[in-house]
Image (cartoon, grey):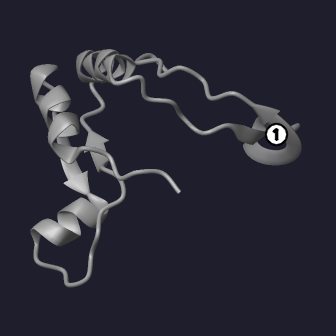
Amino acid sequence: MTDAPNLRDLFRALDRHRIAYIVVGSVAAKAHGAPGVQPADLDVVPSLDRENLSRLATALAELDAVGDTVSGAWQTDEHGEHHWVEDGIERPPRPLDPDD
């Protein structure tokens, strides 16, 4: 089990880098008075414009944020449709790319 993040430090980093975002998840629920909620992470939805995502990538790098490993890959079928296929091969997380 990991320690809960320092939410104050996370909010300060987002503000310092002028990230446009909304807070969702357990932190938002607690802020609205939901009983028995103990946030273990900070869930945000950033604005998707490229400049904002670029600032977010910088903020995450500054925080030494690391994504989860994945055990699957996107594959394209004969009709050009993309499907996620679990293949059991563990891959490191991809870096955040504002153009992605």
Q: Residue at x 21, y 46 (%)?
A: 7
Q: Farthest residue to the bottom: give it.
A: 35
Is residue 81 visible from the viewing direction of this image? no
Q: Residue at x 38, y 18 (%)?
A: 61
Which residue position is annotated with label 1? Answer: 79
Q: Residue at x 53, y 20 (%)?
A: 95
Kind of residue at badge 1: His
Q: Residues within 10 Å of mark 1 (few under 14, many from 20)?
A: few
Secondary structure beneath disc 1? Answer: loop
Residue situated in front as seen by the camera: 62 or 49: 62
Residue 46 image offset from top left, x and y in percent: 27, 37
Residue 26, picture quadrant: bottom left
Is residue 82 visible from the viewing direction of this image? yes
Residue situated in front as seen by the camera: 59 or 75: 59
Residue 65 vs 81, above or below: the answer is above
Residue 79, picture quadrant: top right
Residue 6 image offset from top left, x and y in percent: 25, 44
Residue situated in front as seen by the camera: 21 or 5: 5
Residue 14 image offset from top left, x and y in percent: 18, 30
Residue situated in front as seen by the camera: 47 or 8: 8
Q: Is residue 81 left or right of residue 8?
A: right
Q: Count of labels shown?
A: 1
Q: Residue at x 80, y 36 (%)?
A: 90
Q: Is residue 75 left or right of residue 14?
A: right
Residue 17 vs 38, above or below: the answer is above
Residue 6 vs 52, above or below: the answer is below
Residue 66 image offset from top left, x and y in percent: 51, 30
Q: Is residue 90 left or right of residue 65?
A: right
